[in-house]
Image (cartoon, rainbow, N blue to C red):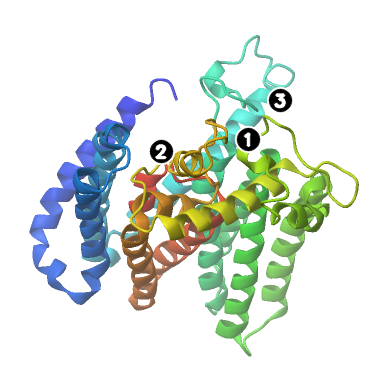
Amino acid sequence: MPEIASWRNTSLVIGAALGLYVSYQYRSLLLNKRALPIWLVGILFLWASFHLFFLSQNPAVQLVEFRGIWKRALLAVIFALGLGLSIANNSERIKKWVWPMIYLGLLMPTLIYLLKWMFTFYGQSFFRLETIPAFLRIYQGPQPFYVPKTDYAVFCLPTLAVALGEILTLLQDRHIKWAQLLIYSASIAAVSFVFYGQNIKNGFAYEALLFILFLLMMVSAIKKKWTPIKVGIIASILIGVGFVGYKHIQQNDSWATFTADSKIAVQLDRYQEWKFNGEKGYPINELGKMVSITNYERIAWGLVGMSLFRDNLLGYGLIENSFGPLVNKKWPESSVRLTHAHGGWLDLALGLGLPGITLVLTALTLALVGTRNLTAPWKNLGRWVLLSTLLLWCTIEVSNNWNFDPLLF
């Protein structure tokens, strides 16, 4: 977005400089076995360097990524390492002021969306503003200040997940802290509103999965400690989110045709429209309707991507857009406009190869397992952010220029 890159880069550099200092202060902790995820991320950078010099299929573009995406990712990792070590070694002393700051940071994309939504639709009628600044508007298509719906999923779903984790912790206490419960419940409602307003199908799907997990963990944690108040709280949240989810399904015909579209999408040889990115139209499903573009392309591209991955286990080399060149190489008649397979982990695997994706997923899994030894709220921050990240990278096209460094962070 205009005028944002310099702020981001300055923050990364300052954060990395502080992170280097803190990491040096606590360097002995990096020899602990629980630091293994950090070392795996470090090896990932070595693998990326090796791939660039010896295995690259597109060295010019890969070098551009190396100087851009990978450089930012390295700064983000050092920044995150310093921040994590600072919190881990001062968790109780700083919890009262650091945790609200971190949670507010997680919540800011959602709050900014709500502010922009309010000005977009009520700026003139309610607030009596003659003109609304461009940066305070919501756009449905490419504009200088347009934010893709995928980015809202990436930065809002983890916030919702952490809110669920904190509610789970609050409901296990003998005395409920109502102010905190209200804040986290409102956060869930706000994120659900973002998903509804932006019509984010993946967001709602993963929200439903997180709620199912929340309920299972709730049953396991509380057991015989259920009270009418706790049941009422959970029921209220579920009814509210369920209503928004129901309205979302109503406005999306693609949910109703998903099975019919899937039957067409899996027949890659018979229906080859997936090769052309819409340039040659789309097939008709068994209902006599044109397939949902989203359903058809995502499923077909996913199957093709897995096939290409098996044929290119060392990876094409690009974080962004490895799928398109690999398709063009195998099927020369395909459209040059193809970019992503539209599944984050699959796109990342096509770019980094089996060694790279193994390093990332192993580091994430080990970090997720390591959250068992933490106390709230840090336990919920680690567990639920990592869990939601693991989910949203499955089917959302987030392997790109601006979502890779947040993943490693």
Evaluate if marks 2 and 1 touch, with contact meaning CB atoms under 8 Å apart: no
Tell me the SS state at disc 3.
helix
Amino acid type, residue under disc 3 in the picture: Phe
Expressed as whole percent of the image width and height from the top left, the position of residue 73 reads 29, 45
First reached walking from the N terminus: tag 2 or tag 1: 1
Q: Is 395 on the left-hand or right-hand side of 197?
A: left
Amino acid type, residue under disc 2 in the picture: Trp
Instruction: Point out the residue furthest to the top here.
Output: 130
The label number, if any, that marks residue 121 in the structure image: 3
Instruction: Point out the residue furthest to the bottom here.
Output: 224
The label number, if any, that marks residue 307 in the structure image: none
* Residue at 42% across, 20% down: 2
How many numbered circles does the render carry? 3
Query: Does residue 220 lie above or below 155 as drawn?
Result: below
Tell me the SS state at disc 1.
helix
Query: Does residue 330 lie above or below 219 as drawn?
Result: above
Q: Splitting the image into 4 quarters, where does residue 65 fall? A: top left
Expressed as whole percent of the image width and height from the top left, the position of residue 387 reads 48, 64
Q: Is 192 on the left-hand or right-hand side of 32?
A: right
Front residue of 45/95: it is: 45
Q: Quadrant of the N terminus?
A: top left
Query: Does residue 386 lie above or below 396 as drawn?
Result: below
Instruction: Name the mark nearer the viewer: 1 or 3.
Output: 1
Residue that badge 2 annotates: 402
Amino acid type, residue under disc 1 in the picture: Phe
* Residue at 61% across, 54% down: 188
Instruction: Name the mark nearer the viewer: 2 or 1.
Output: 1
Real-space Cα distance between discs 1 and 3? 37 Å
Tell me the SS state at disc 2.
loop
Residue that badge 1 annotates: 276
* Residue at 31% across, 61% down: 355
Residue 86 in view: no
